[in-house]
Image: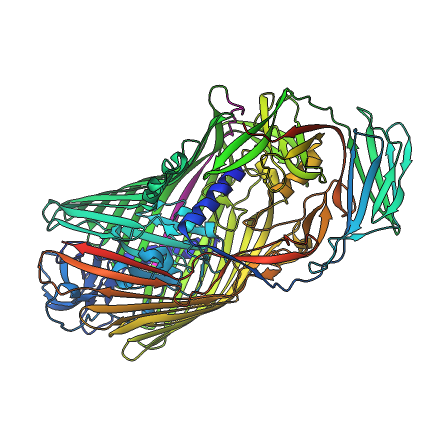
Amino acid sequence: MRRRIYLLISLCIALTAVSCEEIIEVNLNEGDPKYVIEADLTSLTSDQFIRVTQTVPFNADIPSKPIENALVAVSDSRGQVFNFVSQGQGYYTVQNLKLQENITYNLSVNIDNELFEATSKLEDFVAIDSLGVIEERVFNDPYYFVLFKFNDPIDTPNYYRYSTSVNGGPFRFSSAFSDKFNDGLFVTHQIANSDNSLAIGDSVVVRRQCISKEVYDYWNEIQFANPGNASPSNPKSNISNGAFGYFSVTAVKEYGIRIEML
Amino acid sequence: MPYFLVILTSLFFSVSLIAQDKTTISGYVRDAASGEALIGAVVQIKGTQNATSTNSYGYYALQISEPNTELIVSFVGYQFLEQTILISENKRYNFELVSLDNQLEEVVVSAKKQNDNVTNAQMGAFNFTMEEVKNIPVVFGERDILKTIQLLPGIGKGGEGSSNFYVRGGGADQNLILLDEATVYNAAHLLGFFSTFNSDAIKDVELYKGGIPAQYGGRISSVMDINMVDGNNKKFAAEGGLGLIASRLKLEGPIVKDKGSFMVSGRRTYADLFLKLSDDETINQSKLYFYDLNAKINYRFNDKNTLYASGYFGKDDLGYGDLFSFDWGNATATVRWNHVFNEKLFSNTSLIYSDFTYNVNVSNDESDFTIASKIENFNLKEDLSYYADNKNTLRFGLNLLRQKISPASLNARGESAVNSIDIESRSGIEAAAYISHEWRPSSWISMIYGLRATDFMVQGPGTFYDYDDEGDPIGEQLFDDGIIKHYFNLEPRLSLSVILSQEHSVKASYNRIVQNLHQLTNTTSSLPTDQYVVSSVNIKPQYADQAALGYFRNFNNNAYEFSVEAYYKYMGNQIDFRNGADLQANKYLEGELLYGVGRSYGLEWHLRKSKGKLNGWISYTLAKSERQFEQINDGEWFNARQDRTHDISVVGMYELSKKWSLGATFVYYTGNAITFPSGKYQVDGRTLFYYTERNGYRMPDYHRLDLSATYEPRKENKRLHSSWSFGLYNVYNRRNAYIIDFRENEQNVNVTEAYKIALFGIIPSVTWNFKF
């Protein structure tokens, strides 16, 4: 909804004015570095990884600074502990963590005696009814979307996250949805890749995750960040002690489809 | 506070006892050609400082003591009138002034008591007639009073092309905008590029940024009181214009000659006509336009009773094929009855309605729903003015205002993939009483002081939630129909002038104002979908305490007016949001709000020349505006977005010849305070920005020069009168930043870059205006 209004407004600005864009130099301060923890544990395999990095100045020529000396562990509500092993570049892995339904998982990351913790529970996966592709024309330009149709479980809040891999590329976040406006209905989610550039002939793998409210809030803030926001802020993390990033344990399925002439 | 009330009441009685043996005359001052009431015309006893000015209905009352008193009646842009009054049974004198425009030969200019700005107790106020500002250049050639007032000191500009304004560091929602006394909730068309005020329909604007008189209340930063044209009661007349963006037409004329008149004025844009040229079916069925309709009638039953009815209706309509549409607009209606009890006691009773609505319609294969939102109010006002004598005027009245907010509710139709959502409406009643005394105890001092008392009543029925510190709901309370909570407030007001001589004075003012309607905006340009809330169990009324001190000086026989004002304003119960707040269709909306305080202070210089072929003004504001919230910026003070260190406007109008007049404006201001990233990091392979300090950065400085020229051929054809207006917006094509944003470089994602979007480059415009 909000996105549609912004689309319309940008259209309106484009029509009323000859706007122009140019690259500029802005003198930005350096904030105190913050740790960033990406922990997206999924039910796909028992091989899991967690990434620990640190923020860098805006003008740095690296996207973030890997942290190599963290102690990363995940424990579950049955008392099992999984210690992750550093693989370099900020990646930490474990081979034997198979996620179980209705089990609560705790993340603990220790960096130079600073402790960051988070808790997450595996949400039930909501099965889909059908998969498809749709073409939409906006001002005569075609845009392609993968369609997911499914019955949203009634009377429980549900949150969904999609990421896509196009032609064998890495998975990237596409969009996140909540059932705030369509709880319990037969719902259609329209998924594109991160920059909305699916084309005829692309082969796409879409990863569908059922996520917790905290993780949804995190991704929802990211997807609705726009230059018209009066006071942009750091998305709210579910990890303690001021770390950025998120801790998510989810049931996942992947769906492959080819964008073809309809 | 009771002490204050005692003084006030004792003054009231002493005032009524003074000088009963003098005679008070009263009446109306009007335009000789159209019968239009003149607001703020001065009626003066010749050779003395005894003077009064007409109120917003053109009414005056003046006490005279000698038989054969000579009066001078004057108004800016009009030839003054000298008349000798014989005190007799007749105490009613109506005056008609002739506009300088309607004279065949250039005669003496008006002899208005032009040091009014020095001697008047009121400070922090501006008054304009539309006539005075007609040659100021504007974007797209659309004359716009909201753009004009942004050129005054202390009035912060809303940004490129915006009709938003910020008064003395306050928010855009803290300005009370009244059109014939009706509240206009959203004064912007097309995202703010145009205001809802069609200049043809507007007679006069009064703006208060400090020392706000007690008859106004409800918004803490300013009051903008706009009066519509009454309509010509002598003859039928039409006026209009064809412009690049919009066309206008106004019709006016007598209902009964000299007794009643009507005025209808309309404006519509036609940018959407170009969409019709497209081959694409979705595009040529798209909508993009707005229109305004103003109408007013008045009828004078006799010298004691006049009835006015006026209204406004405007709408913006955007649509993409039949898939999506979005419309919004204001409507206002005002019925007023002026009654003169006797020469000294003037009464106006108003019954007012206004609303603002927006509707979104989505209809595609998946979803079929509408979203509708409405805010409306009914307002009953009784205002009385008692002209005790030439030194004392009392204004007092009552006001009962009911506001109701029906937040966006979603209505799904048929087999839609969305559920209907109904959010409870909220309403509140504000009862107010005020008294204000304008007092000129001697020739060197004058003052206006008063008190406004308000009781805001939060109305049920409704479910109100309690929230913890994190904003999560922890309990709920159900209320039946009735009053749930009272917020009682006393608002003292004072404005005082010490007249050092007829050329200079020192003024001081103080006001407290309370606001019970709050607009929730989290975007840089305010959108029609911005949610309103009234004070509730959780949301406390906003208030402002403002003190100001100023020096006013006229030079060169009042040809130049100079003033400098310093102010300090403290704002309580200000509202902001938690990070990632969900403001749409959220029944726990109040849990997303944060409460804090604000302060602003500044110095304003203003130099104005209003006589001669060259006139205009220079204004400069040096100011600071800050906010403090416990949960934002670690509880440290941070700059308000509209904090502008420097703000300069230069306005010049020059009468080149009988046919040509030129206008120019130059503006410069410090860029808005804004939040930029202080670092970056990567999540899921995408670069995210790391923000530290709220509004810790600045947009680049903004500056722009606009020019205009008006060509008015001499009236060969006596009936038709036409003119051409040419405009050039942003003459040196400055690319002022509208938005600055950050992104990954397309070639190398490891590199991040900043880019700016500029909106308007140089824009020429031409408008043809006619009148007959």
Residue range corresponding to the magenta coloring: B416-437
**Left or right: where does residue A211 sit relative to residue B277?**
right
Q: Residue A111 or B424: which is nearer the viewer? A: A111
**Left or right: where does residue B315 sit relative to residue B742?**
left
Classify B762 as above or below B605: above
Is residue B217 shown to the viewer in this render? no
**Left or right: where does residue B494 sit relative to residue B80?**
right
Image location (x, y in percent) of residue B583: 56, 39
Is residue A113 shown to the viewer in this render? yes
Q: Residue B91 or B312: which is nearer the viewer? A: B312
Colour mapping: rainbow
Residue at 54%, 64% (x, y): give it: B700
Image location (x, y in percent) of residue B135: 28, 64
The quarter of the picture where residue B657 lies is: bottom left
Q: Residue furthest bottom?
A: B556
Image location (x, y in percent) of residue B138: 34, 60
Residue A29 is covered by the magenta coloring? no
Q: Residue A198 or B698: which is nearer the viewer? A: A198
Residue B423 is covered by the magenta coloring? yes
The quarter of the picture where residue B290 lies is: top left
How many discs mark residues in the rendered view? 0
**Left or right: where does residue A23 sit relative to residue B331?**
right
Image location (x, y in percent) of residue B543: 51, 51
Classify B563 as above or below B127: below
